[in-house]
Image (cartoon, rainbow, N blue to C red):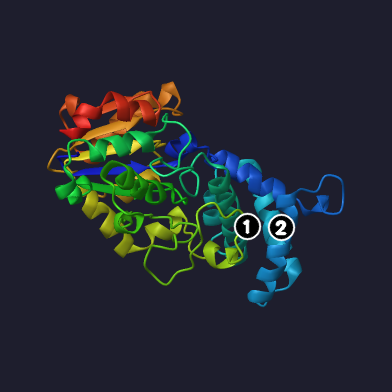
Amino acid sequence: MIRSKTVFVVVGGASSELQFPSDAELLARISQSFDFSRIGTEMQTRDGVFLLQQLIKLAQRLSKGEEALRQASERIRIASKLATSIEAIIDQHDNDPLVAACGKLGIAHFICQAEAKSILRDAPRAPGELPIQGEDTWLYQLGLLVTAGVPRSRVEQCLENLAIINFNYDRSVEHFLPHVLVVAFGMSLQEAQRLSIIHPFGTVGRLPWQGGENADVDWGTEQPWNIQNLAMQIRTPGEVMRDQRALTNIRALVTGAKRLVLLGFGYQPQNVDMLIDYSLSHDPEVLGTLMGVPSSSHDSVYKMLRRKTGIEKDDLITLTNAKCNHLMRDFSLLLES
């Protein structure tokens, strides 16, 4: 059980353990599929054909010509040569809503596809099992962490000190954790499905059991019929930074936390700014992964965190060059304290 107010910040590196694409991989898949010159040749792909069909529908929906949508998708394909993510391209072209519409459609398609192909199944293979292949993931470790030492009569304590800010578009955390409570405590799945997670950049729709009026889609639906509505729920860093209400909610969680756990974080300045606007006077503990961050940048990351948080004590910031799974496992006693 987590006994201190803890905020987990989940970014792309954490989802890679579940076989989701990295920012670079997602951009490459979108840009390759937007090469519509391949359509009708032996080089055409299933993804390219599907996205072209959706772009034609999108053109009709937006009352735009098909050629205008093709030009916007081509702009993304060309810009990808000098970009690190599809979000960066959308924000660079903030004067062109068609680039945003095409880019978000690509994001929705490939994230839904990744959910379908991930190691998280839509349901357990048999009663009493978890819907995941293997135990070598941070999500499994989180399940162990939140249920350890909690009696069934106080099951609400599992999550009362936990908040999750998930920068990813997938719904893996909210899909998986209810099954953890079912296995650990014998709850019904419906009774366990009460988890709330902040997704600053939105998701590819809500899961059907989640409340709200936005479009929903079942976990593992590779080509949802309502993909255009799902794409409308996606936001970019630039859009979030202009949403003062969203920033206030995010920063309030961080300000109230005794411990920050950064999983798969790339420490991009813009993402750090979303979490922290002023130094944190209460000196929280910070625990984070450095996997994927160049070793030459490790010192810079440490100094940047000290400057942004205002933390002066060296022992309050722990950064480890390990997978998210290993961090959760190796620091489990600390995380429970």
Q: Which quarter of the figure has residue 312? A: top left
Where residue 72 sits in the image (x, y, percent)? 67, 60
Residue sitting farthest toward the bottom: 63
Regarding residue 104, the answer to whether it shows in the image is yes
Q: Eyeballing the image, is 150 above or below 95?
A: above
Q: Which of marks 1 and 2 is in front?
A: 1
- Dot 1 surroundings within 10 Å: few (below 14), some, or many (20 or more)? some
Q: Name the residue under label 1.
A: 223
- Amino acid carrying mark 1 in the image: Gln
x 41%, y 44%: residue? 127
Q: In this view, does 173 lie to the left or right of 205?
A: left
Label 1–label 2 contact, CB within 8 A: yes
Regarding residue 96, the answer to whether it shows in the image is no
Q: Eyeballing the image, is 329 above or below 109?
A: above
The number of discs equals 2
Q: Which quarter of the figure has residue 228? A: bottom right
Q: Mark 2 points at which residue?
A: 50
Q: What SS does tag 1 mark? A: loop
Who is closer to the viewer here, 19 or 29?
19
